[in-house]
Amino acid sequence: MECEFPTVNSNKEEMREIFNMVKTIAVLGLSPDESKASNRVARYLQSVGYKIVPVYPKGETILGEKVYRSLAEIPFEIDMVDIFRKPAAFDAIADACIARGDVKVFWGQVGLVNNDAAQKAKDAGMKVVQNFCSMVEHRKLMS
């Protein structure tokens, strides 16, 4: 897939609303490696009061939270998915979010854009953010 410019995206005011509304964040691709961006971002979000739900193919716990293998396995409501996966995976992730029916925010991290998947998520009623770091934006907008 070629690099895309995000054509489906939230503005700063919508991001502020997202941070105020969200309580539980599933982090897709949350690595147990503390040097990885996914771990640093999730640790920050956890430190400011969000419930973090790791979605990762290995391990039992990350950041003290039970690891799930997929969104479908999570047995409680998820407000937001924070995605640290390749853009090619976004279509299946959007489908999984739609199938759950409770995800309100579809967030692709810095450098991650898939406009088709983002439009699908938006059409299903989710707020969409692409190519922004949730930690950086939270620090800028909420401090």
Image (cartoon, grey):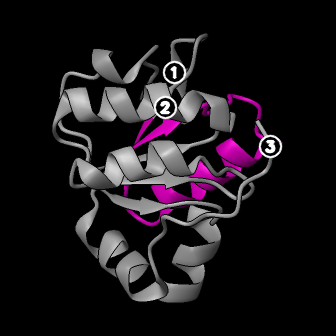
Q: Of the residues under marks 1 and 3, which one precedes in the sequence?
A: 3
> What's the mark number on residue 61?
1
> What's the mark number on residue 2?
3
Secondary structure category for the residue under label 3: loop
Q: Amino acid at mark 1?
A: Thr
Q: Which residues are magenta?
A: 26-53
**Distance CA(mark 2)–CA(mark 1):** 26 Å
Judge the density around disc 3: few (<14), some (14-19), many (≥20) Cα neighbours within 10 Å. Answer: few
Q: Nearer the viewer, residue 5 or 141?
A: 5
Q: Is residue 33 left or right of residue 9?
A: right
Q: Is residue 131 magenta?
A: no
Comparing labels 1 and 3, the label whose residue is closer to the camera: 3
Secondary structure category for the residue under label 2: helix
Secondary structure category for the residue under label 1: strand
Judge the density around disc 2: few (<14), some (14-19), many (≥20) Cα neighbours within 10 Å. Answer: some
Q: Position of residue 37 (x, y in %)?
A: 75, 48
| Figure quadrant of residue 48 | bottom left
